[in-house]
Each structure stands twice: as C-alpha cells, then as structure tokens.
C-alpha cells in the first residue's frame, strides 16, 4: 500500500515537472517571438527615418 502511494506521488510529481517544462517552453517561445517582432519594428522605423 505504501509503495503504491509513493509511486503514485512520484508519477504525479514527474508529470507536473513535465507540465512546468512545457509551460516554460511556451513562455520562452512567446518571449522570443515578441522580441523578434520588436526588433523588426525597430528596424523598419529606423529605415523609415533614414
């Protein structure tokens, strides 16, 4: 019984870790996308000014 509970807790913690990794990957990719858009906007504005 104790072994079953511990393995259940272990599987839950590992799945939550995977979920956190997926969430952080989504956040990082969104951040990179936003920074790319920002850099492109700055380049375009500099070209328009010049």
Image: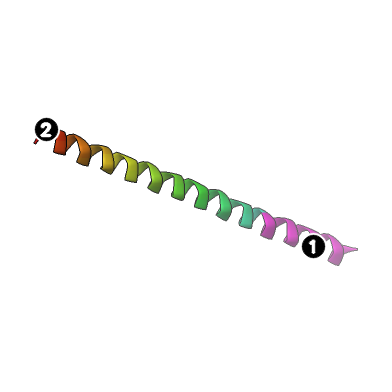
**Magenta region, residue range:** 1-15
Q: Quadrant of residue 38?
A: top left
Q: Nearer the viewer, residue 39 or 21?
A: 39
Residue 25 included in the magenta stretch of the image: no
- Left/right placement of residue 20 relative to residue 42 reads right
Q: Please tell me whether mark 1 sits on a helix, a strand or a loop.
A: helix
Q: Nearer the viewer, residue 12 or 24?
A: 24
What residue do we see at 15% from left, 38% from top?
47
Residue 12 among those drawn in magenta: yes
| Quadrant of the drawing holding the N terminus | bottom right
Residue placed furthest toward the left: 50
Front one among 43 and 17: 43
- Badge 2 marks a residue whose secondary structure is helix
Give percent across and percent down for residue 5: 83, 60
Q: Is residue 16 left or right of residue 23?
A: right
User: Which residue is label 1 attached to?
Assistant: 6
Q: Reply above or below: 6 against 44.
A: below
- x and y, in percent, of residue 42 in the image: 22, 38
Q: Which residue is mark 2?
A: 49
Q: Quadrant of the C terminus?
A: top left
């Amino acid at each position: 019984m104790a072994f079953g509970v511990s393995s259940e807790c272990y599987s839950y913690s590992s799945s939550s870790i995977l979920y956190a990794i997926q969430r952080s990957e989504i956040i990082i990719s969104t951040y990179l996308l936003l920074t790319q858009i920002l850099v492109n906007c700055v380049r375009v504005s500099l070209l328009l000014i010049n």
